[in-house]
Image (cartoon, rainbow, N blue to C red):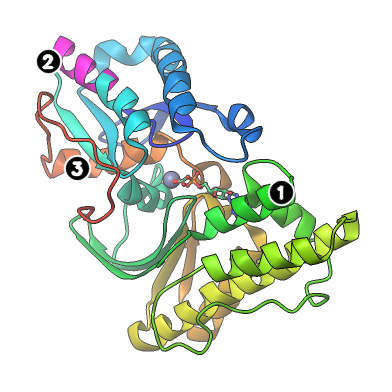
Amino acid sequence: MILSIESSCDDSAVAVTEIATKRLLFHRKISQEREHAKYGGVVPELASRLHAVALPRLLEEAKPYLDDIQAVAVTNAPGLSVTLLEGVAMAQALSIAKGLPLIAVNHLKAHIYSLFIEKEARFPMLVLLISGGHTMVIDVGGFDEMEVVASTMDDSFGESFDKTAKMMGLGYPGGPIIERLAAKGDPDRFPMPIPLQHSPKIAFSFSGLKNAVRLLIEKNQPLDEQTKADIASAFQKAAIAHLLQKCKKIFQTKRPEDFAIVGGASANMAVREAFANLCAEFGANLHLADLEWCSDNAAMVGRCAVDAWYLERFTDALSIEVSPKTDNIF
Ligand code: KG4
Ligand code: ZN
């Protein structure tokens, strides 16, 4: 069995995965969303302190499995350094005290493995990762073959939902709030620019959209409920149209047989629907993780670690590195 730990952002989670069967034996998560909501986003120092309280509690709950653990896995990059360190410190202590091998898991790779909880991994696959920290298309050939095909030049897709919600004073995380509100709005009341629509660049950008939302909010003060819903709806429509336009370009050259969407924002139903249509148009199979595994969790870390175990990708507990950066991911 592998014990896995996640603390890259605002979710503390611990899981136990059976190596041979890939079965998830235990998973518990404590989300800090409520604590960060009043600030409209994640406060790293607060997040770090909350992990320091939550992780030992989660480990305590996993105690019945501890005697049978054969390796400890932990997210070490990318993420917030001060929160990653909480999980990594616990993993180092466990690994050293119990003499267990340590597996460092890349957070983005873990999101890809959210597709394979209790399943065999299936590659090649073209993957769209949309979360609070990242927006990228990755061509995945296997555990070690991951090529970033496109990524965002500024904000991430999820972050643009968070910022839109924050600007309208709606709370955090913005994704589910904006999605709910958008369903009640008229997406065509306010024209919204689709980012990089006329650019040949295969890249994403959400900061222009954020500014368009800011101007709309300023112009329509005081915001009534219907106007908030109409802004949310127009924003979501443009953000998804942007993802879709750029992915369509990638589909035209890559012609993937299998396409997946992972990350917290892959829970968005309008995103799922839009991409189901794109995949139908290109005859590609669409793969999605169960809703439970879209946002950060330790089950995907454990599942990724199982493949690392078979490839003997172990890390020295005394020299494991923590990094906020994305460039050395794959
Ligand atoms: O993967 P995740 O839990 O954490 C990161 O690795 O960042 O993703 C969290 C992000 C947040 O920005 C959140 O607003 C966004 O995913 N999100 C959504 C939805 N649910 C979560 N964005 C759009 N629509 C949603 N339904
Ligand atoms: Zn994530």
- Assess disc 2: are there few (<14), some (14-19) or many (≥20) residues with their C-alpha within 10 Å of its C-alpha: few
Q: Which residue is mark 1?
A: 177
Contact flag, marks 3 and 2 (Cβ < 8 Å): no
Mark positioned earlier in the residue sequence (3 or 1): 1
Q: Is residue 202 left or right of residue 210?
A: left
Front residue of 117 and 330: 330
Mark positioned earlier in the residue sequence (2 or 1): 2
Q: Which residue is mark 2?
A: 99
Q: Main secondary structure of the magenta part?
A: helix
Mark positioned earlier in the residue sequence (3 or 2): 2
- Residue 63, percent from left and from top: 37, 10
60 vs 298: above or below: above
Residue located at (40% from left, 75% from top): 203
Residue located at (39% from left, 31% from top): 7
Q: For the residues marked 2 and 1, what is the alpha-carbon distance in whole angstroms?
A: 45 Å
240 is within the stretch colored magenta:
no
262 vs 271: above or below: above
Q: Secondary structure at mark 1?
A: helix
Q: Which residue is mark 3?
A: 308
- Residue 40, percent from left and from top: 62, 40
Q: Which residues are magenta?
A: 90-99
Q: Secondary structure at mark 3?
A: helix
